[in-house]
Amino acid sequence: MKKVLIVDDSIAVARQLEKIIVGSGQYQVVGHAKNGAEAIKLKQSEKPDIVCMDMNMPVMDGLTALRTMMALDPQAKVVMVTSLGGVGDKFTEALRHGARNVISKPFEAEKVLEILGVL
């Protein structure tokens, strides 16, 4: 069973994503973080197989956290979560800095599981 870390400052969004992920029976959520700084610490302590991380958060945004995670572990499997719909500079920057894919809000359960399934 693959371990997943969910990073989002919205409790409602994090719960929705967790419900989809855990409901598949293939993944275990090993932690929640409200910002990128917390995510970096939890990634090091919990050693998740996959990190699902929002792009826009207080304290440290997802792109900054992504760059740090990739510097610490170039093989990290990070999927960015965004309401940008897969367009724009932030989307492109996330992929350029090592994100494996992007999950768009609102979530479609099948799409989330498809993206995680290839990692």
Image (tube, rainbow, N blue to C red):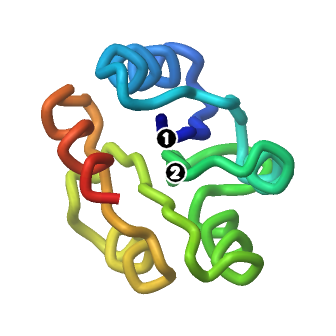
Question: Which residue does the image show at 55% across and 39% down from the upper left?
Answer: 4
| Disc 1 element | strand
Marks 1,2: beta carbons within 8 A: yes
Quarter occupied by residue 88: bottom left
Q: Name the residue under label 1.
A: 2
Left or right: 36, with 117 as reference point: right
- Compared to 34, does 13 lie above or below? above
Left or right: 60, with 66 as reference point: right
Left or right: 57, with 12 as reference point: right
- Compared to 1, does 47 lie above or below? below
| Disc 2 element | strand
Question: Which residue does the image show at 21% across and 52% down from the upper left?
Answer: 85
Gap in Å between the C-alphas at discs 1 and 2? 8 Å
Question: Which residue does the image show at 41% across and 85% down from the upper left?
Answer: 96
Q: Earlier in the sequence, mark 1 or mark 2?
A: 1
Q: Position of residue 87 (x, y in %)?
A: 21, 65
User: Tag 2: residue type?
Assistant: Ile
Q: Mark 2 points at which residue?
A: 50
